[in-house]
Amino acid sequence: MPVYVYEAEKAEKSCPKCRGGFEIQQSLSDEKLKVCPQCSSPVIRVIQAPALGRSQTDLHYRAKRAGFHTLKRVEKGEYEKIY
């Protein structure tokens, strides 16, 4: 389930939780929150960049151990053997 960030529409009429912004885990089918769960003041959902992870595998290590080698392109048509 995605995590959404909400913050207060009007900071002067809100609690410290929604004034600073808070995260909540919601299903895609759930409706947006309209009010803060703590103080009931109006909140808006903040758009954020997605968190993208990149797996770190040991592919190069395993290939080297199995006797394979890796080439790095130096120029057009020229390659350098890394291992």
Image: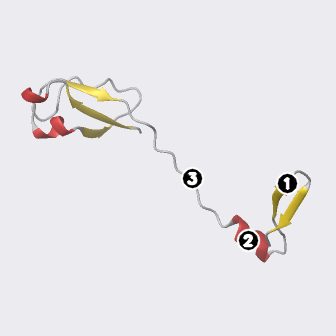
**Secondary element at tag 1:** strand
| Cα gap from disc 3 to disc 1, whole angstroms | 28 Å
| Cα gap from disc 3 to disc 2, whole angstroms | 19 Å
The part of the image, by quadrant, that contains residue 10 is top left
Query: Looking at the image, which residue is at 30% across and 24% down?
Result: 32
Q: Which mark is residue 62?
A: 2
Q: Amino acid at mark 1?
A: Glu
Q: Earlier in the sequence, mark 1 or mark 2?
A: 2
In front of the other: 72 or 58: 72
Mark 3, other Cα within 10 Å: few <14 / some 14–19 / many ≥20: few
In front of the other: 70 or 75: 75
Closer to us: mark 3 or mark 1?
1
Q: Which mark is residue 75?
A: 1
Residue at image mark 3? 54
Mark 2, other Cα within 10 Å: few <14 / some 14–19 / many ≥20: few
Closer to us: mark 1 or mark 2?
1
Query: Looking at the image, which residue is at 30% across and 28% down?
Result: 45
Mark 1, other Cα within 10 Å: few <14 / some 14–19 / many ≥20: few
